[in-house]
Image (cartoon, rainbow, N blue to C red):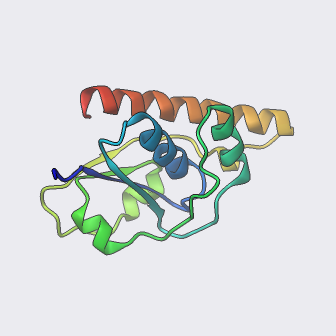
């Protein structure tokens, strides 16, 4: 059986952006990828991220918020950081064959205003991540 490429999404707290990317690649990748996500810290799954993903038809409610696992990091084919902090502080990888990308997205958890304004920011970030995942699945980059 052919090994599926491992995609490891990283951000600071593994609560929003990396979880959204994880959910979309699992949903849109048609089983072609092994998908994991983690953070420099584990902040717990953001309930608003779960809600906006449910609106998009993707259930991430059973995902866990995890800290970066060096073993997974070193066997990943793709390491994709979703925030500048994770990009700057990503642990050194011993895997020289890894493809590392930085896809920067605003942190919706930092949004302020009314609940409607905050949810609007979550939806905007969700849709931006979805479109980037669709491009990745289509073009492999």
Q: How many marks?
A: 0
Percent across and percent down for residue 92 are 26, 69
Camera-nearest residue between 8 and 85: 8
Q: Please identify the quadrant where the C terminus is shown.
A: top left
Residue at x 58%, y 39% (from the top left corner) = 58
Residue 20 figure quarter? top right
Residue 54 figure quarter? top right
Camera-nearest residue between 14 and 55: 55
Q: Identify the residue at the far right of this view.
A: 114
- Determine whether 6 is above or below 69 in the image: above
Residue at x 42%, y 41% (from the top left corner) = 25
Q: Identify the residue at the far front of this view.
A: 1
- Determine whether 46 is above or below 118 in the image: below
Percent across and percent down for residue 68 are 41, 69
40 left or right, relative to 123:
left
Camera-nearest residue between 89 and 52: 52
Percent across and percent down for residue 28 are 43, 34
């Amino acid at each position: 059986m052919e090994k599926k490429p491992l995609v490891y999404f990283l951000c600071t707290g593994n609560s929003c952006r990396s979880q959204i990317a994880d959910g979309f690649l699992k949903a849109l990748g048609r089983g072609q990828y092994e998908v994991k996500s983690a953070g420099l810290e584990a902040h717990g799954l953001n309930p608003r991220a779960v809600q906006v993903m449910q609106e998009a038809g993707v259930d991430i409610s059973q995902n866990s918020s995890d800290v970066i696992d060096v073993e997974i990091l070193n066997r990943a084919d793709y390491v994709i950081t979703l925030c500048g902090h994770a990009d700057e502080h990503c642990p050194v990888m011993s895997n020289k064959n890894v493809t590392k990308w930085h896809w920067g997205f605003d942190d919706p958890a930092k949004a302020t205003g009314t609940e409607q304004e905050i949810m609007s920011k979550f939806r905007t970030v969700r849709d931006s991540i979805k479109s980037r995942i669709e491009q990745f699945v289509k073009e492999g980059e």
